[in-house]
Image (tube, rainbow, N blue to C red):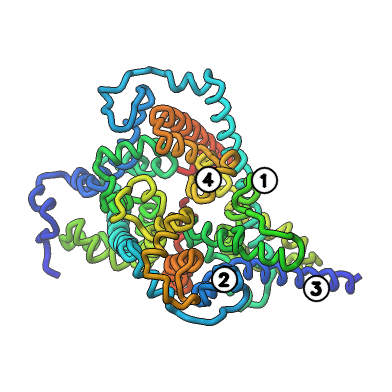
Amino acid sequence: MTSRIRFGDAAFQTLNYLFFAIFTFLCLFPFYYLFINTISSNDLSARGLVTWYPKEIHFDNYMQVLKLKGLSQAALVSLGRTVIGTIACVIGSAFLGFIFTKRKMWGRTFWYRFMMVTMYFNAGIIPWYVIMMKLHMTNNFLAYILPAIVSPFYVILVKTFVESLPEVLQESAEMDGAGTMTVFGRIVLPLIMPIAATIAIFAAVGQWNSFIDTVFLMTDQKYYTLQFVLYKYLNESNSIASIIRSSGGAANVDLSKMQTATSIRTTVSMIVVIPILFVYPFFQRYFVKGIMIGAVKG
Amino acid sequence: MKPAVRTDSLLARGGRGIPDRYRLFLYALPFLVLVFLFSYLPLYGWIYALYNYRPGYTLSNSPFVGLHWFRSIFANPTQTQEVLRVMRNTLAMSSLGILTSVLPVAFAVLLSEIRTMWFKKTVQILTTLPNFISWVLVYSIAFMMFNVDNGLINKIMIDLGLQDRGINYLATDSHTWLAMILWSTWKGLGWGAIMYIAAITSIDQELYDAAKVDGAGRFRMMWHITLPGIMPTFFVLLLLSIANFINNGMEQYFVFQNAINKDHIEVLDLYVYNTGMLGANFSFATAVSMLKSLVSIALLFFANRMSKWVRGESII
């Protein structure tokens, strides 16, 4: 009897480890595969001959791809919206979350609901697009920033966090004559740093990955983001062909270093994913914390 | 500390006379205006559903058609069929999404059975990674793996002799729903499990010890202690996904769509985009998205009612 249980146990454990090993491999391998294709001979990668390890390693692709027309501009736009959008979002949600903890605020419950409802309800994408157009948010960098300042979810995170702080801290400062802004800047802000960091990291990833807003709102190449450019490269083999032609005469170029559709796709993908790969392991605990606090009052 | 000089802001100084309650409201006002502009003002755009609007014209130049577009959804057979097809896809994807929402639970329960700490940590970190890449990148990966010319899967299949030539896995309409749900599982499984993993860690260890004394084995403990311990979390998340039942977004379907799989991949939002933005049929698309918004409000109220009834607490 006991030996049968032990056997079942061991079998279960083995299968369990095996399952997680396989799934983890499936999650990791695509990134590895992308990477080895960017540093291998472009001729081989185009023919699909780079499978498990890099062949004829070179790092030229990264330099060459950044020289492509429009790509460095797109990188700049992506970087810009990530930095500015994140700062604006953190300040916005921190301040609004703080204000919403003030029971004295006029119509607090109403305004809080007013904001919360937008998490679940929206007018639909076409009416939204029409209004964005009317607000001159098409082909306008601000369209990446302004709508991102207030995110109900982050406001809830801050509000919950501030409410968990001892009230005495704010009260005593107010007793000493500090106004709302002073209390926010001097007392609350330093204390909510952990949650602000969590929001920052979420917002930054969100901005970096954002894609559909460019599809709707931007027709001018100046405002294309890396994600959007990558999408275009994935879909328009014609545009890739023309890029390759314009990226330098193919006449006397080493075949293993000449750009191909595959090398451009993989390298741009890698450029898009590298920031995430680098940021993620260090901030993983912030991500986890964010979702945990959100869950309490989700 | 130096007392009683409020130097904090213009608003506070200039508005000395304003009672605190309004002053606090004024602080929040700029942000509430943003919410109004970007989330409420679009409701005004619903008016386009009542006109025959063409981009480039103004609303006053467009003929008023009343409920024509709403009627045409039900009266015009081709449009009825289109909308039904899109509804079918939407409901299929959402239902599959809800069915697969038990996978993160299983993932968390199984992972909690793993005792090798470094292994557990590594699994957790690496499996949550795909959640943080964009759908465009997922598509890029899909392209690298499955495209017909030099895709890895085709390569392997041909090498193994299972295929004699490349198959274009991305441009096919067979198993579109399955493919979509597999991609979203790949992307979201590890991350979805995180909350359950935390819920499991917070289960009282004494329960397990007591069960062990009573002779319970691993599986009985999973069934009688671990699962009930994470049920409340599961329930909340389930309600949230019901509230969002027809809001399955469009990014994933947008990047994966092509001329061949369109029949099965077009969900509501994507359909609205395709007819409105690409087909320039603004008014009809607006009518469809209005109906969608109304259904999603109804679902939200339903989920909220359920939550109040079962947990005694609302979700909004």
Q: What's the CA distance linking mark 3 and mark 2?
A: 33 Å
**Dot 1 crowding, Cα within 10 Å, few <14, some 14–19, many 20+:** few
In the image, residue B227 above or below residue B313: below
In the image, residue B37 above or below residue A91: above
Q: Amino acid at mark 3?
A: Ala
Q: Which mark is residue A33?
A: 2
First of labels 1, 4 by sequence position? 1
Residue under mark 2: which chain is it in? Answer: A
Q: Which residue is mark 4?
A: B240
Q: Which residue is mark 3?
A: A10
Residue under mark 3: which chain is it in? Answer: A
Q: Are marks 3 and 2 on the same chain?
A: yes
The percent coordinates of residue B173 (x first, y second) are: 63, 44
The percent coordinates of residue A167 (x first, y second) are: 32, 59
**Dot 3 crowding, Cα within 10 Å, few <14, some 14–19, many 20+:** few
Q: Secondary structure at mark 1?
A: loop
Q: What's the CA distance linking mark 2 and mark 4?
A: 36 Å
- Mark 1 or mark 3, whichever is nearer to me: 1
Instruction: Specify the quadrant of the image occupied by residue A259.
Output: bottom left
